[in-house]
Image (cartoon, grey):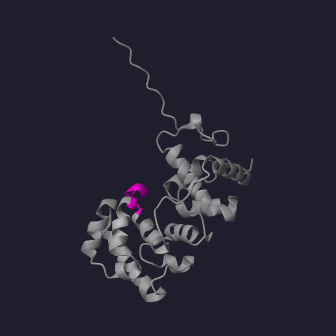
Amino acid sequence: MTRGERAAEILRILRKTYPDAHCELTHRNPFELLVATILSAQCTDVRVNMVTPSLFEKYPDARAMAVARQEDLEEVIRSTGFYRNKAKNIRAASAALTAKHGGEVPRDLDSLTVLPGVGRKTANVVLGNAYGIESGVVVDTHVGRLSQRLGLTKHRDPVKIEQDLMKVVPRESWTLWSHLLIWHGRRRCFARKPDCDHCELSALCPSAGKHTPKQKTARKRR
């Protein structure tokens, strides 16, 4: 089976397994998704979703966020970690959106990736989920880990992993592919103890069973 054929079968199985797979960052518009994605770095979606309601109530759009006091913004997002740098980037990105795009989030990769704190991954999240634009494959820790285990890439660098995936995953499924692997990584293919015995992809996975911790042999009593 080629990588393309394996990817197609993985996509088929995961679509059946997780028919409701979607972006788990709560948002009502592209700006909220952009900010939430910046906050999600080194932080769980659950934690981000606990913070954003009060954040967006206080700063509902780019114009309001751009003039927020650094200290006030830091206090609201403190629990997401790395809050000083995140607050700095969110304020700067909001200022750029206000000055260059009328407060609106642009619909192209180049315009997004020049914003402070916005890399290719964040831009792909926003374009794919807010605008339905398949600009690339979002490679987070789950997507990277599962793509390696499933034999779809040998790389560890997210950019190279994305390039490999874009060759074997149909473009119209790039955004969905990321959601499916993220859901599977959170529910079955865990980092330390993947549930290979019950995994829907075990027959397709060259790593099946290899990450199961070995049982320690009990020491003989002297």
Q: Is residue 156 visible?
A: yes
Q: Nearer the viewer, residue 20 or 87?
A: 20
Q: Which residues are magenta?
A: 40-49
Q: Which residue: 48% across, 86% down?
A: 101
Q: Is residue 86 visible?
A: no
Count of numbered tags = 0
Q: Quadrant of residue 98?
A: bottom left
Query: Above or below — where is 150 with respect to 109?
Result: above
> Would you say residue 43 sits in the magenta stretch?
yes
214 to the left or right of 52: right
Where's residue 170, x and y in %?
70, 61
In this view, 65 is above or below 142: below
Horizontal relation, residue 7 to residue 90: left or right: right
| Residue at image location 58% in from the left, 68% down from the top | 128
Q: Is residue 102 left or right of residue 14?
A: left
Which of 152/16 is in front?
Answer: 16
| Magenta region includes residue 15 | no
The residue lying at 51 percent from left, 35 percent from top is 212
Classify residue 51 by image quadrant.
bottom left
Q: Quadrant of residue 47?
A: bottom left
Rendered residue at 60%/49% (across/down): 18
Q: Measured along the vertical axis of the image, is residue 167 above or below residue 208?
A: below
- Locate the C terminus and report the quarter of the image it occupies: top left
Relative side of 180 to 44, left or right:
right
